[in-house]
Image (spheres, rainbow, N blue to C red):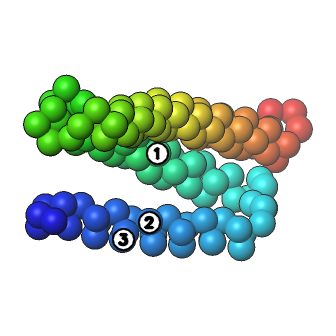
Amino acid sequence: MTSTATNVYTSAQRACDSLVDLADNLDALGRYNLPQDIDIAALTAQHISNILKVAYQIAFAYHNAIPAPRDALKIYDVDERSYLRVIRKHSLFAFRSGYDAFRCFDDIHDVARRLEATTNAKTAERLRPKGE
């Protein structure tokens, strides 16, 4: 195994550990205390969106790192090249799915910000003295 391949593996393992920690903390949270926590919920959605954006970029880079079957003619026989086709097909699907997940969380962040702005405006309206 090359040192670069080992570095990629090590980086993936560290990222996985951090994401498991995030999932554990989300599980422990239960639910946000709204409307007080809407700001932190929106910021968290933005971070998750960024994570998913990087994830789909990683999936695409991984897809490109796997040799196309025609590029592996000297390395593998027909059966082995069919496995490469499956790996590339699945990694491309992961890229597309990752992009969809990224877009969803990006939208969640935007909607949470609109919810926060609407809630703040209504609160300000209620606190405004009558007759102003």
Q: Position of residue 16 (x, y in %)?
A: 44, 66
Q: Amino acid at mark 2?
A: Cys
The residue located at (52%, 34%) in the rendering is 97
Q: Nearer the viewer, mark 1 or mark 3?
A: 3
**Residue 57 or 117: which is nearer the viewer?**
57
Visible residue check, residue 81: yes
Asked if the residue at tag 2 contacts the one at tag 3, i.e. Cβ–Cβ closer than 8 Å, the answer is: yes
**Residue 93 or 76: which is nearer the viewer?**
76
Tag 3 residue: 14
Tag 2 residue: 16
**Residue 114 in the figure: left or right of residue 48:** right
**Residue 36 or 68: which is nearer the viewer?**
68
Q: Amino acid at mark 1?
A: Leu
Q: Position of residue 51 (x, y in %)?
A: 44, 50
Q: Nearer the viewer, mark 2 or mark 1?
A: 2
- Viewport quadrant of the C terminus: top right
Q: Position of residue 11 (x, y in %)?
A: 29, 65
Q: Secondary structure at mark 1?
A: helix
Q: Amino acid at mark 3?
A: Arg
The residue located at (75%, 60%) in the rendering is 32
Q: Residues within 10 Å of mark 2 (few under 14, many from 20)?
A: few
Quote the CA–CA distance across marks 3 and 2.
5 Å
Closer to the chain start, of discs 2 and 1, is 2
